[in-house]
Each structure stands twice: as structure tokens, then as C-alpha cells.
Amino acid sequence: MRVCDPAEIGEAACARQILTRFTRRAWRRPATDAEIDRLMSFLTLAHDSGDGFDVGMKLALEAVLLSPHFIYRVETDPDPQSETPHRLNDYELASRLSYFLWSSMPDDELLDLADQDALHDPATLAAQVDRMLADPKAQALVDNFAGQWLATRAVETVEPNKTLFPGFEDALKTDIQAETNLFFKEFLETERPVRDMLDANFTYLSDRLAAHYGLPQVGSQTMTRVTLDPSSHRGGLLRQASFLAITSHPNRTSPVKRGKWVLEKLLCKEPPPPPPGVNNTVNTDVLTGTLREKLEEHRSNPSCAGCHALMDPIGFGFENYDAVGRYRTMDGDYPVDATGTLPDGETFSGPGELAQILKSDPHLSACVAKNMLVYALGRGDSPKDLCAIQKIAADFDARGGTFRDLIHVITESEPFTQRRGEALAIGGNP
Amino acid sequence: MKKWEISRRTLLRGAGAVMALPLLEQMLPSISRAQAMGAPPPRRIVAFYVPCGIHMADFTPSSTGSSYTLSKTLTPLGPYKAKFNVLTGLANLPARPDGPGDHASGTGAFLTNAHPFKTEGTDIRNGISMDQVAANQLRAYTRFPSLELGTDGGGTTGNCDSGYSCAYARNISWTGPQTPMPKETNPALVFDRLFGAESGIDTAAQIAKRKKYKQSIIDFVREDAQALDKKLGATDRKKMDEYLTSVRELELRIQAIDEGPQCTPGNAPGAPTDIREKTRAMLDMLALAFQCDQTRVATFMLGNAGSNRVYDFLGLTDGHHTYSHHQNDPANFAALQKIDQWEIEQLAYLFGKLDAIKEPDGTALDNSLIFFSSEIEDGNAHRHTNLPIILGGSAGGAIATGRHVKYTNNPSVGQLFISMLNAVGVPTQAFGEATSPLPNL
């Protein structure tokens, strides 16, 4: 960060240059003259205490990094108590963009556009989004957004029973996580519609993961793109071990968890919690019969049936995959039955047909849109966002349904480009 | 809409890490100055958390009073029987979740006795925890207000349990309603934090100058925060309050910069991955922190909420959480009893370490209060009543020990926390849902 030489241009002038540049990056906006003056006082303090330029600068830089302007992303309102929306200023917009797409601070180009008050111009904004998505820093969207939405991070904490599932080791977990992340990344970077995630005919495998799936070796332990044969029993997000393992118990699959995951993550139709006092585990040791028969009580007990009629059939569609995502045709002593009937009467046989039903579900776009908007804003959605989410979902579909389309629609949306204050709560704090 | 948000990077570190200040910490010499200042003799609070409940049939002693017999699960505590109480029948009713989520909600409320707000977003809301109420006062005597330790890591954002944020499932210490204190899970890093700053000897003039410099930075950022505060709405002002509190905490530590250390910490531990070694190493660090009077408040989580750890060294093949949904199967009860007894062995280990630290008026065990419990009672029923509680130590004789006290009508753990806080010299009238101390203690 050596921008000048104090011996050449004088200590005060050089300090001012350094602090002006450093605060602009750290605070993601230019510091005011008054703020720079206050920081300059650290140089005076050091000098008066018998120390030199370097000590004074170090104090000033510590203060910059300890300041709330560095630690928090500050967005202010003209009137903190007014709920009328107003446009963000361009520095605030630059921060929203960079934390959304890069999980990091704005770069010089974004700040330069903000200096010119040009960033919010729609054409400029769209061009910046494209530039940012092409930057390697956009990998943060894969790690953080896919990691949270598709829960690929949760793969790290999956701990299957070591006796039943030997060989489910850390290296395999890493590959399972990488498979879904690379799969997502390809959707992010290409013009494939998001819906195709349900039935795409490609994936990424290492030799280790291919062996786990019972597929031909790819010739490397590096994750390699593979086109899947229809007979491979793979294809689409929901036949990847990440989804299949994180929704399982240590010793068996959980059709309930798998069904709930699909409803929650892909359709945003999470069923309400079970009623109080319900016995919510299955004893796999005592009862006989298939898991499907054991779970039958869900549908014979009226207090359970309403929700389990939604969750269980979807989950049963994936019973051809065990608790670590391996293909199987037998569950213990019983042949797998992967057929199901959805509440609307639609029937399917196996995960392929189920994926087609989910792919054409009208709730899918809105759910993906909601998840990404929540991520972009860093806050949960509220009923006030409902209209905006519907509009974002409609535009997302209309433009072609790719992640790039969705990101553009979100960055142009009112919730992303505007903010509002918060009315005083009655009896609340001043 | 929210006024402003902390950066995603900060969120990922956990909201409580907002004031992680490596530069400043590195320059602070270690101190230990309690007795030198004529302060009261040290009284300490520990909370020891275990996940997934306890199999009560093997935990609860069959008789009460001072001549009770230890239950099977409690046998490891035999050598210290005169130095702790078993308390049964207490409840933590605010811990009951909205719908499912008993593990996260019970863990969030473990020390707060408040009702955690169901969210997987950043709008988490809980109460202040009992240990942090103690820390707010006892910090005046030590370098660190409190230590948060555990065995299992993980971030504090996102959904951990049926719509409850990981902030609730992975933290029991809360400095404020929105601020969990992330725990340290690497014993080597705990050692570094406690003792890593010891370096050389500074002259009084050097120390004075350093204090002046640090104070000038504190003044600068406080001015920033106060100016900002005027532009904010109610919600964000609360956030700024917490920032200012952190700044004040740092200021107190700067003012406490004093002479060098007064104890010999010994060698740093390694970074064990085996749960048995890791637990011992963490409890060693806890005892060492007390011995060197680096803090008087500590929490320890032997696993996160609803942990599904597989205790293969106990001959068990399923996860803890799986067993805890026992379906009244004797085989599951036997597995749970083994896990419970192992957990109690770790508590006994801590008791032993503290009892070996001799102080002018007893041992460190005598002078502490150690609250041991779980986020629920029974793992199958997810009850928040009749919690399994052991209260170790007597806070220097303030509490009569060696008894099994059985309570009826579900008195609140909040009442116990009021009694504990008063016993360690932190006057408290009300806590959580409670407004009176616990009788018969």
C-alpha cells in the first residue's frame, strides 16, 4: 500500500494520500475531509509521544479497521422513521452488488462508477453484473449460495454409521460436495435453464466418486465432467449423493426428510411442524416389513396424514438410493418400491419420472427466486416482499430462466436497489 | 426492511466476533491482578452442556437428602460426592420451541431461560445468558470476561434444526439478545489466546504509552459509532449498542494492562481430533484459565445441539441422537446410559482438576459453581421439564452440598440461575422468566 514516500512529499501530505485511499476501500466509500482530519490526529499523537511516521500510520489504520464503518455495511435513510422506499446511493449499491456476487468488498471499478453516480444506470448496472459474474471472485456464489441453498456445506457433517457404510471418508465427502458445487457452477456460467438441474444428463466425478456410484472410472481423482448414460441411474441434482446423504439418518434413508427437503428447497412449500407430543422416529430394529410399511402410520393417523401425504411419496421416489447415495434395488430383504402417488393424483415410477414432475412444477421458479433474493439481501423475506418475489419470478421465467437471468432480475429489483426506514414501534425504544 | 447489515463475512464468523481484534490483543500483556488489588476471593461460574438429554432412569438417585446413594450413571462422581448437588424436577419452559426444533431451542435457551425466536435468518433473538450476566461483573478482576469452549464447531448462520438458526444450536453463551458468543473448539488456540501474548518485559513508560495509544483508538471509534447512532432507526441502534458495549469491554481490558503474569501456564497443548483427548485438553484449558485467574466465567459444550456423534470407543454403532429417540427399547437405554456415564466422567475429570487447585479458602472446585445439564430431559419425548442437573461446588460455602434435592411443580432453572449468581457475588433479582431464587439450596 505504498502510495507515496513521506521523505519526498512530506509526511502530512503522504499520510493524507494513504488514508484517503485506504478508507475508500475499507469503508467502501470516500471518507469525508473531516474524517481524514480526525485520522491525521494519530500522526500528531505519535509525534508528540516521541514516535515516528510509521507508528502514527499504524494507529490510524487500526482505527479505520476498528471503526463501525468498516465492521458494518452502513446504509442510512434520509428519515430513519419513514417507510417510504428510496433509492440507495451508488456506494451502497456497489456494496450490495459486491457482497451478493463476490462475498467481498467493491473493487475500484465499482467505486469509480459510484464516484460518478453512474452505477445505478440500468445499462451500466447490467454490464457490471456481467463483468462481476465473469470474475473468479464469483466462485463465492457457488461456495456460499449453493452451499446454503443446496446445503452442500452440510455434507461435511454427515456421519453415516461406519459399520453399515464403511469407506464413507473425508475424501469422498469432499468429492460429493464438489460434484454438486461444480454442477451448480456450470448452471451459473452457461445458458442452461435452472429447471434443467432436475434432469441434466451430465455431472462431475472423480474415480473415487465413480466407484461409490458404481459407474466407470473417469481416469483421475480430479473432478471430471462426465456425460451420463440413461442407464447410469444418475442425472439431475436429486440423484447426487449430496442431497441423498444429507437427508438420511446415520443408519438408513429417510423418505420423510427427502420429501421435506424437496418441498422446502425447491418448491418453498415446507410443511408445518408435526403436532406436539408426536413420536417422530421409526424403530428399525423391532418392526418388520419395509420402511414404506413402517411409515404407513403417517397416513393412517389423521393428525399426520395431511403433511405426510405431501412428503412421503416424494421421498419414496428416491428409495433406490441408500443413506450414502448408492444405487440399490433391495432395501434389506425387500425389493425397493420407488413408485408414488402425489396428492393431486399424479403417479410416478422412480426418480426419473418424479424429476420430470418437479421440473414442470410452477412453484419452482418462484422458490429459486426467493432463495436467491434472500441471499442477495442478507435478510429473511417478509410478507412485504411477496409482490416483489412474484414479479422477480415472472421476469426470471420470461427472460429464459437461467441463473444469469435471475441475477439480473434481482439486481434490477426494487428490494435490491431501494431501502426504507422503520416506523417507530409503539412503546418501543426511541 | 432492515436499516443495514453486517457484512456476510462477519456473519460467517458469527455475530459475536464483530470485535475480533488481533492487532490489539497481540499487544496486550497478560495480567493477573485480582488478589493484588485487594479484590474479593475468586468465585467462579461454569456451565457444562451435554446434548440429546439424559436417560433419567439411570441418572436420578432413588433417594433424596444428604444420605442419598449415587445412581449408576453418577458413579464417576463418587470421590466428590460431598462437593456437589443433584437437582431434579427443574424446568426450562421458555425453551419449548414453536413446533419442532427442541434441540436448537433448548440449547439456545440453555443459559438464557428465554424463548429463542424461531428464525433461520439473521434476525435471531434470545436473552442474555446467565454466564454473561456473571461476566459483566466478574470481568473487572480478570483479563478475559469469559471463555466459551466446545468440542464441535460449525458456523452460526443458516438453519440447524427445523427452522432454528445454527446460532441457537451451537452457542449457549449470549452477551445480548442478538449476540451469541462463538465458542473455541481448538485447545491450542485457547492456550494462545490465554497466554500467547506474554512477551518480554516492558518499562512502565512503555506500558503507559501503549495504553494512551490504545485509548486514543477507542475514543476515535466511539465517536464514529455515536455519530452514526444518531442516523439510525431503533433496530440498528440496538446493534450499535452492542458495538459500543464491545468497545467498552476493550477499553476495560486496556485499562487493566498491568504487570506481567503471575502463574506458569506450562506448554501449549496439541490439536487432538479424538473426542476423548480433545475434551480433556479443553477441560485442562478451562482449569488452567481459572488457576491463572485469566477469567472467572466459562462455558463448555460437549457437542452441539442434537449431536449425532458415534461413540465407537464405547462399542456403539449408531449416533447419539439416533439412540436418544429410544422408543423405550432397552438396547437403546443401555447405549444412552453408556454415553451419559462417559459424559459424567468428563465432568468428574473437571471436578478433579479444579479440586487440585488449592486456594487460600479452599479449592477452585469449592470456590466455583458448575452447572451441568442438557438441552432436554428425555431424548424421545423432548421434554423441557425435570432437567438432569448437577450443581458442582459451593461458591465458597454459599451453597450446602452433598445432597439430592427433588423439586416439584416445575420451578424454573431461571430461579437456580438467580441463586447461583447471588452466590458468586453478582446481586440478581430477576433472570429469564424467574423473579425469585430457588428454595432449599
Image: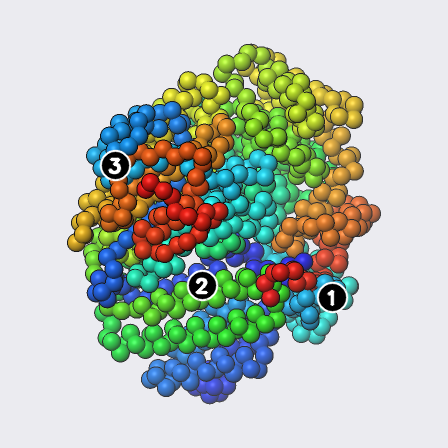
Disc 3 and disc 1 in contact, CB within 8 angstroms: no
Give the CA distance from mark 3 to mark 1. 65 Å
Residue B49: x %, y % from top left = 39, 40
Amino acid identity at mark 1: His
**Vertical comparison of B421 with A165: above or below:** below
Assign a secondary structure to mark 1.
Answer: strand
Q: Badge 3 local density, few (<14 within 10 Å), some, or many (20+)?
A: many
Q: Amino acid at mark 3?
A: Gly
Residue where numbered disc 2 is placed: B246
Tag 3 and tag 1 share a subunit: no
Report the front residue among A332 and B241.
Answer: B241
**Residue drawn at point x = 27 percent, y = 29 percent:** B68
Q: Measuring from the top left, give residue A313's x and y in whole percent.
A: 69, 24
Return the residue at label 3: B402
| Residue A86 circle label | 1
Q: Position of residue A148 (x, y in %)?
A: 59, 44
On the same chain, marks 2 and 3? The answer is: yes
Q: Residues within 10 Å of mark 2 (few under 14, many from 20)?
A: some
Quadrant including the C terminus of chain A: bottom right
- Where disc 3 sits, the SS reads loop
Residue A428 lies in what quarter of the image? bottom right
Looking at the picture, which amino acid does disc 2 mark? Ser
Q: What's the chain of the residue with tag 1?
A: A
Question: What chain does mark 3 sit on?
Answer: B
At a point 55% along the width and 31% down the height, the residue shown is A245
